[in-house]
Image (cartoon, grey):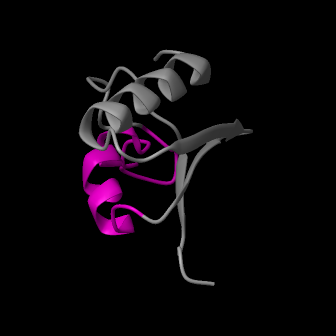
């Protein structure tokens, strides 16, 4: 697993490639990465794009990860879109 700094860099790059007209803020805290932006694409579009960075599913109460192929992920991925119309 790569560290969170590398993950945030990958997320920023992917967002820039897919939505070059928008600016995104990508931050980390504890076990989470938060992506914030104003206007632009709907949250479901960003969620579809970044779902692969969400922490793998757990099979049981022992928290055994069933997706060790994923090279970069976070336990919690939060999306926060602000409307242009306030």
Q: Nearer the viewer, residue 33 or 73?
A: 33
- For image coordinates 41% across by 23% down, the residue present is 10
13 within the magenta span? no
Q: Nearer the viewer, residue 31 or 7?
A: 7
Image quadrant in which the C terminus is located? bottom right
| Left or right of 29, for residue 36 | left
46 over 29 or under it: above or below: below
Q: Position of residue 33 (x, y in %)?
A: 59, 42
45 within the magenta span? yes
The residue lying furthest to the bottom in this view is 86
Q: Position of residue 29 (x, y in %)?
A: 74, 40
- For image coordinates 27% across by 47% down, the residue present is 49
Count of all numbered marks drawn on residues in the image: 0
Q: Position of residue 21 (x, y in %)?
A: 35, 45
40 over 76 or under it: above or below: below
- The residue segment tinted magenta is 40-64
The residue lying furthest to the right in this view is 30
- For image coordinates 50% across by 22% down, the residue present is 9
Q: Nearer the viewer, residue 79 or 19?
A: 19
72 over 56 or under it: above or below: above
79 over 74 or under it: above or below: below
Quarter of the image where one finds residue 85? bottom right
| Left or right of 35, for residue 70 | left
Q: Position of residue 14 (x, y in %)?
A: 33, 31
- For image coordinates 49% across by 25% down, the residue present is 7
| Left or right of 50, for residue 3 | right
């Amino acid at each position: 697993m790569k560290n969170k700094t590398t993950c945030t860099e990958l997320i920023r790059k992917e967002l820039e490639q897919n939505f070059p007209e928008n600016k995104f803020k990508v931050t980390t805290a504890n076990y989470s990465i938060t992506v914030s932006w104003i206007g632009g694409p709907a949250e479901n579009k960003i969620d579809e794009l970044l779902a692969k960075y969400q922490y793998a599913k757990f099979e049981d109460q022992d928290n055994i990860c069933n997706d060790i192929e994923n090279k970069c992920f976070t336990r919690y991925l939060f999306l926060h879109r602000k409307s242009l119309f306030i």
